[in-house]
Amino acid sequence: MAQGDMHVFGSAIALFLTGGIDANSDTLKAALVSSSYTLDLAHDFFDDASSAQLSGTGYTAGGATLASVTATFTIANSWGTQRANSTAYAVGAIVRPATGNGYLYRCVVAGTSGGSLPSYSTVMGATFSDGTVTWEVWGRGVVVLDCADPSWTSLDAGTPAYVIFYKDTGTASTSPLICAMENSVASNGGNYTITINANGLLMVAVQ
């Protein structure tokens, strides 16, 4: 693993729903933390992780401010990625049928899709096989939080175990956590970029 495997802090979903986090106006940041931080999805504020931040050339405490932050809602039949025959899919891939049926499907077992159309289930949460891929009926739409890839110039501060995304209020103890991306790419004094998943930083299914 290099960069991937996103984990969402439970309190973040509630804050998005109640307006506690506003992607359009709040300052969102990405912080790099070492393996001395133990991931706990019950953590709620940045002070739970801030003491484990990297220190070294090119890194400023608090991390990098996210740019080009967007939050969008897409109904299933308008989702851009269509399931294709004989195609490799990784866990987490989200697709819709080429002929939309109002549902999105999430890959839960990686593999290669079959050479013909599968029999799509429309029972929310149900799974079915497609070649060696297993799909889950995931939702009827999706909210995507996205941003530009955060980066650091001439970073030489060690290897972050996690990239912590959070809303910065100016005080760590009141700065809500959003999600954590696992990471194993070492910094070496060059430019350092965190690659956000092609589907976005955070996806929430609408059922």
Image (cartoon, rainbow, N blue to C red):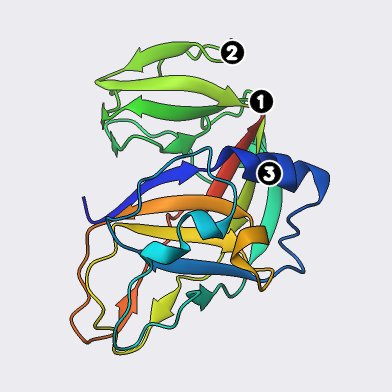
Please give the name of the residue rendered at 64% of the width and 45% of the height, measured from the top-left corner.
12
Q: Are marks 3 and 2 in contact (CB under 8 Å)?
A: no
Q: Quadrant of the C terminus?
A: top right
| Element carrying mark 1 | loop
The circle drawn on residue 102 is: 1
Up-down relation of residue 26 to residue 71 (above or below): below
| Element carrying mark 2 | loop
| Element carrying mark 3 | strand
Q: Which residue is mark 2?
A: 122
Q: Which residue is mark 3?
A: 74
Q: Mark 2, residues whose alpha carbon is within 10 Å: few (<14), some, or many (≥20)?
A: some
The circle drawn on residue 170 is: none
Q: CA distance from mark 1 to mark 2?
A: 9 Å
Q: Nearer the viewer, residue 174 or 102?
A: 174
Q: Viewed as shown, does residue 99 lie left or right of 87?
A: right
List x then y, in percent, for residue 16: 73, 47
Q: Are marks 3 and 1 in contact (CB under 8 Å)?
A: no
For the question of whether residue 135 can be seen, the reply is yes
Q: Viewed as shown, does residue 176 lie left or right of 112?
A: right
Up-down relation of residue 60 to residue 14 (above or below): below
Q: CA distance from mark 3 to mark 1?
A: 11 Å
Q: Are marks 1 and 2 in contact (CB under 8 Å)?
A: yes
Please give the name of the residue rendered at 56% of the width and 66% of the height, measured from the top-left corner.
147
Up-down relation of residue 192 to residue 97 (above or below): below
List x then y, in percent, for residue 91: 34, 34
Up-down relation of residue 177 to residue 207 (above or below): below
Q: Give the mark nearest the N terminus, 3 or 2.
A: 3
